Image: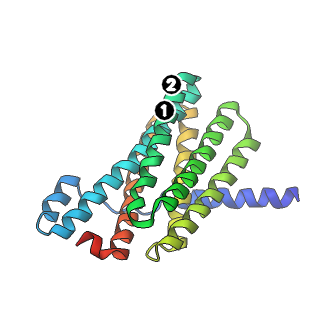
Amino acid sequence: MKTLVTKRRALTTSMLAALLFPAVPLWAQHAEQHAVAAQAPAANKVAHSDGVMRDLWVDHIFWVRNVVIDTLAGNKMAAAVAEQQVVANAKQIAAAIEPYYGKAASEELFRLLAGHYDAVKHYVAATAAGSKDKQAAAVDSLTGNATAIAKFLSSANPNLPFDTVNGLLVAHGGHHIRQTQQLRGKQYAEEAQTWEAMKQHMYVIADALVGAIEKQFPNRFG
């Protein structure tokens, strides 16, 4: 049994490594998007929603990064404040889908996002404590949560294929893991590169969500 668990964790780690830096297209600046979008009302609405969703997801990684830094530094008060912002941000992301899928779906997404953060938080705590076993358990939770979120989103919107969403979320979890390891090891130049990759990846996730919602509810954007 122990061998199977070890193999599973090794497979999970391999998946995270493989998906950590997927090919990410270069995205235009927000100002350029809005300038082009102004030519068509429908496109303008989509661009606006796109920008809002991007901001929400970038805020997610911004505040989680603060939690990581403060936790590793042993600054519990600062970490607690950053965590409050992580929770508030998760509520905002969940609220963004409520106009399309209803309050129950919004609450479920918030629950899943809370699970995502909880797994990251446990990984950070395990890293600070130097516990490889707890790190592995946190990775298992993070991967399982990615699957749960992907199932939820793909069942709500046929334009969000499970495999695609799951891959994006597993890669996102991998970014959190790499960032935590780099900050713990004081590899600041490397972490700066990871941060840029994380931002680009958040744009991919945000754009995928907005694009899928637009396709599912075209009249809401017309």
- Residue at disc 1, secondary structure: helix
The quadrant holding residue 159 is bottom left
Which residue is drawn at the image coordinates 39% and 71% (left, top)?
212
Residue 2 in the image, given as x and y percentages of width and height: 87, 55
In the rendered view, tell whether residue 185 sits above or below residue 51. above
- Residue at disc 2, secondary structure: helix
User: Contact (CB < 8 A) between labels 2 and 1?
Assistant: yes
Residue 125 in the image, given as x and y percentages of width and height: 65, 35
Which residue is drawn at the image coordinates 68% and 47% (left, top)?
138
Q: Is residue 87 left or right of residue 13?
A: left
Q: Nearer the viewer, residue 31 or 213?
A: 213
Looking at numbered disc 1 in the image, what kind of residue is underneath it? Ala
Marks 2 and 1 sit apart, C-alpha to C-alpha, by: 6 Å
* Disc 2: which residue: 78
Residue 82 numbered mark, or none: 1
Label 2 Cα crowd, 10 Å radius (few <14 / some 14-19 / many 20+): some
Residue 152 numbered mark, or none: none
In the rendered view, tell whether residue 33 sits above or below residue 216. above
Looking at numbered disc 2 in the image, what kind of residue is underneath it? Ala
Which residue is drawn at the image coordinates 46% and 54% (left, top)?
94
